[in-house]
Image (tube, rainbow, N blue to C red):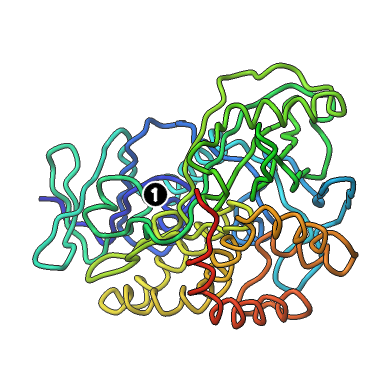
Amino acid sequence: MNQRDLLVIGGGPAGAAAAIRAARSGVQVTVFEKGPHGRDKVCGDGLTPRAVAALQELDIDLGPSHRIDGLRMIAGRTTRELAWPTTDRFPNYGAVWPRRLFDTYLIDIAIAAGAEVRFEREALPVMEGDRVVGVVAGGVMFTAPMTVLAAGAQGAAAKMLGAERDPDEPFGLAIRAYAQTPRHAERHLEACLSLRDEHGTPVPGYGWMFPAGDGTVNIGVGALSTMQGFKKLNLNTLLDQYAAIVGEPWSLGPYLDKPRAWRLPMSSIRRHGPGWVAVGDAAGFVNPMNGEGIDYGLESGMLAAELFIANPATAPDVYDTMIGERFDAFLRTGRRFSFIIGHPFLLRNGLRVAVGTQAAANVTLAVMGNLVDNETPGAAGRVMRLADHALRLADPLLRRTRAAA
């Protein structure tokens, strides 16, 4: 039996953030990552200004990443190119950082800070009654006052703790590949909001071109489960259709690898309990409007570590309260809104509103950039608070009338 102060299941951005924060404070922390050192993670690779702010709070050098200054939104015949806004909370730039490099960079910083990382070790929680008292990994038991679940929402550890996706809530599917392009050094992300499947059905989601600055672009598409005909959606076909659209303007080369798909959890039945908390994807912290969750993973990982340092006994309950105050209203609104845009007619008209005026586009930019939460001032904050109230009242109707998957 091996005693530690803090255990972390998962070595992605959320787990690494928790480990970095804890180790720098002298906490004896062990991270269990079931993949090898340098493993890849299927993702769009985009870092929002919010994610950059979290990395700055961790004193992470963004030098290896490719700077992004804004977002180009395309909806039908309308194109709006907007710069990330300057605010008191977040910087006015984001980044693209391929996950194979980004995740390795973060976990190496955790190791340098003093965290122990055990690669190729799947860890499962050990329970005494309803309390997590440690983990078993590679046939060895480790104990600690608190365990951080940072291994996503679909693994065995999440199932054991009940930190699974709520089956009544929407989720997303996405697929990405890399391709060469002479526009690889552009400083705007590009998002096509008016995708259609092979049958011509509007897709609640978007296609993206995220220039990586290394000769390549991350090209991908994503869709919400509230889409009409979602169960029949062929992601590979959708990606190929999108690649045909952007191929000429981006002088796009062939895929450099086989396209890879993944599921985006957007809810969690449980995110804390005696002796444990869930962070990042494991807690369902994914923006339903854009599928982004790295920033939420970094923030929740740091918060979990900080609360553990302050008081291990109260950390899980305080964490659930504080993280709920920060994220729940926006993410709940996003999930409810996804039921609306699952209807093709409402999606088409909603897109016209979203980019129809500069003011509306600015709000859409804030939503797509994860810049909205309970503390957001200005028009974007007001719109989201009003939407949260209105959609809460409409929630029963939205669920009864959702588009047939």
Q: Nearer the viewer, residue 175 or 28?
A: 175
Residue at position x 41%, y 32% from top?
37
Q: Nearer the viewer, residue 279 or 33?
A: 279
Note whether 176 is above or below 111 in the view shown: above
Note whether 232 is above or below 240 in the view shown: below
Residue 158: x percent and y percent?
Answer: 29, 53
Instruction: Report whether 187 appears left or right of 101.
Output: right
Instruction: Report whether 262 appears left or right of 253.
Output: left
Note whether 375 is above or below 203 in the view shown: below
Residue at position x 56%, y 77% from top?
394
Residue 27: x percent and y percent?
Answer: 34, 62
Residue at position x 74%, y 48% from top?
193
Identified by mark 1, the residue type is Gly
Q: Secondary structure at mark 1?
A: loop
Residue at position x 32%, y 66% from top?
270
Q: Identify the residue under disc 1.
A: 152
Q: Nearer the viewer, residue 18 or 346?
A: 346
